[in-house]
Amino acid sequence: MSIQHVLAHVSAQPDEVTAYTMGPGRIAAIVAGLLALAGVIVGGLALLRSTGDSRRRRAVTAQLLGAIGIVVGAIVVATADGGLGTGNGLGGDVVAGVVGLIGVVLGRLALGRSRRAG
């Protein structure tokens, strides 16, 4: 075997993926999770500390952030190559979907309270 053949074979092999490698699936899972978490926080604030117009704005913001987290998570889940533990961000996206749903529900509850109060 020539050295050129060996070098071509070595360079054709994919890079090693470790537990710390940040692929596009993991990055999307982090973004979806952060958006969904922001929706939960804003929804909780809308329920606890807001009155009138600020409650309505926060409720709508919570619903939007939660829904965006759900959609981004669903897109990555639909396009993931492997299952849980493969590094595609599948587990994070499932969590982002659940947290996003909580954000949407909190926003909806706050919106209902703002309509009753106003």
Image (cartoon, grey):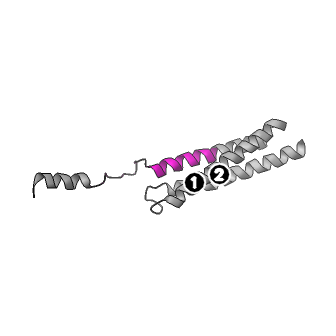
- Please name whichever residue, 103 or 5, is drawn nearer the observer in this view of the structure: 5
How far apart are the two marked residues, 2 and 1, measured between alpha carbons? 9 Å
Mark 2, Cα crowd under 10 Å, few <14 / some 14-19 / many 20+, is many
Identified by mark 2, the residue type is: Gly
Q: Mark 2 against mark 1, which lies toward the viewer?
A: 1
- Please name whichever residue, 6 or 19, is drawn nearer the observer in this view of the structure: 6
Query: Does 100 lie within the magenta span?
Result: no
What residue is pinned by disc 1?
73
| Label 1 secondary element | helix
Highlighted magenta segment, given as a residue range = 13-37
Quarter where residue 1 is shown: bottom left
Quarter where residue 13 is shown: bottom left
Q: Is residue 80 above or below residue 32?
A: below
Mark 1, Cα crowd under 10 Å, few <14 / some 14-19 / many 20+, is many
Contact, mark 2 vs mark 1 (Cβ under 8 Å) = yes
Residue 91, position as x, y percentages in the image: 52, 57
Residue 64, position as x, y percentages in the image: 69, 46
What residue is pinned by disc 2?
100
Using the image, tell me which numbered label, if any, was put on residue 114: none
Q: Residue furthest left?
A: 2
Q: Is residue 98 left or right of residue 2?
A: right
The answer to whether residue 51 is visible is no
Q: Is residue 53 left or right of residue 72?
A: right
At 20% from the left edge and 56% from the top edge, which residue is drawn? 9
